[in-house]
């Protein structure tokens, strides 16, 4: 019995293109998002301790932090996030209608409460005023964190966090049109806490989720 060409796996770019045209399929394009933080200020800036070397050997050695935004009919929703580079887990986040140091501070407090990291952890972010603010730097110093910041205008210096934003937007947010901020908050919270941290598999982690990878690490270290 022969198999319809429509059910055969494409074995070349030309074959795939022809089938796509026959089925009238369109590939979803990645959306480009503008920078959210403002590095044009006179606040003190920390040196770049990572220099694009994202190679921790355990959880809570390197965190990366950043801000992004989500469109709703009610107005922008801003999201501050912190990611553990080793486990790929989002360890802290906060959402609000204003892009302030208080918002980034809430995300940092969440990460500190949930992880209780040892002194010496490197906290890396861009040079946005929210991360250079005195109050934010005090929290870092009191918690024993080392502050690291990207070079001006270089998104690759914070690649792990930029990667998460792209994943969040392309796997989840791009499929919605939010009427208000509460709708967006609900979807984002569910994506991070239920799916991304606990279920989404990463090839870099051996095809398991961030939470499973963290648990596996602690079991092996015990």
Image (cartoon, grey):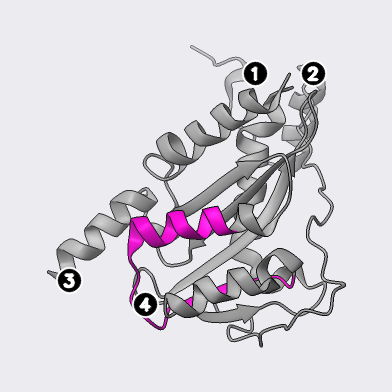
Where is residue 73? Give x, y as percent: 80, 23
Which quadrant of the figure has residue 126? Answer: bottom right
Residue 88 showing in the rendered view: no
Where is residue 156? Give x, y as percent: 71, 70
Which residue shows up at 60% across the image and 14% down it?
A: 4
Label 3 vs label 1, nearer the camera? 3
Please tell me which of labels 4 and 3 falls first in the chain. Answer: 4
Label 2 vs label 4, nearer the camera? 4
Please tell me which of labels 3 and 1 falls first in the chain. Answer: 1
Q: Quadrant of the C terminus?
A: bottom left
Please tell me which of labels 2 and 4 falls first in the chain. Answer: 2
In the image, the segment drawn in magenta is 105-127
Which residue is denoted by mark 3 in the rendering? 221
Which residue is denoted by mark 4 in the rendering? 57
**How far apart are labels 4 and 3 at the CA level?**
12 Å
Q: Secondary structure at mark 3?
A: helix
Magenta stretch encompasses residue 93: no
Which residue is denoted by mark 1 in the rendering? 6
**How far apart are labels 4 and 1 at the CA level?**
46 Å
Magenta stretch encompasses residue 116: yes
């Amino acid at each position: 019995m022969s198999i319809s060409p429509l059910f055969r796996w494409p074995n070349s770019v030309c074959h795939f293109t022809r089938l796509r045209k026959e089925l009238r399929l369109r590939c979803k394009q990645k959306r480009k998002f503008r920078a959210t933080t403002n590095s044009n200020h006179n606040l003190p800036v920390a040196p770049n301790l990572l220099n694009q070397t994202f190679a921790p050997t355990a959880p809570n050695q390197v965190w990366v932090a950043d801000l992004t935004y989500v469109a709703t009919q009610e107005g922008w929703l801003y999201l501050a996030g912190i990611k553990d580079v080793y486990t790929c887990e989002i360890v802290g986040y906060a959402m609000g209608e204003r892009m302030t140091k208080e918002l980034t501070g809430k995300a940092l407090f969440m990460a500190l409460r949930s992880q209780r990291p040892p002194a010496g952890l490197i906290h890396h972010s861009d040079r946005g005023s929210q991360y250079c603010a005195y109050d934010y730097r005090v929290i870092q110093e009191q918690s024993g964190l080392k502050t690291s910041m990207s070079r001006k205008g270089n998104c690759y210096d914070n690649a792990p966090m930029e990667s998460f934003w792209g994943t969040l937007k392309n796997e989840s947010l791009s499929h919605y049109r939010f009427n208000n901020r509460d709708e967006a908050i609900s979807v984002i919270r569910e994506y991070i806490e239920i799916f991304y941290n606990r279920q989404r598999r990463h090839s870099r982690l051996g095809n398991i989720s961030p939470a499973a990878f963290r648990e596996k690490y602690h079991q092996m270290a015990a």
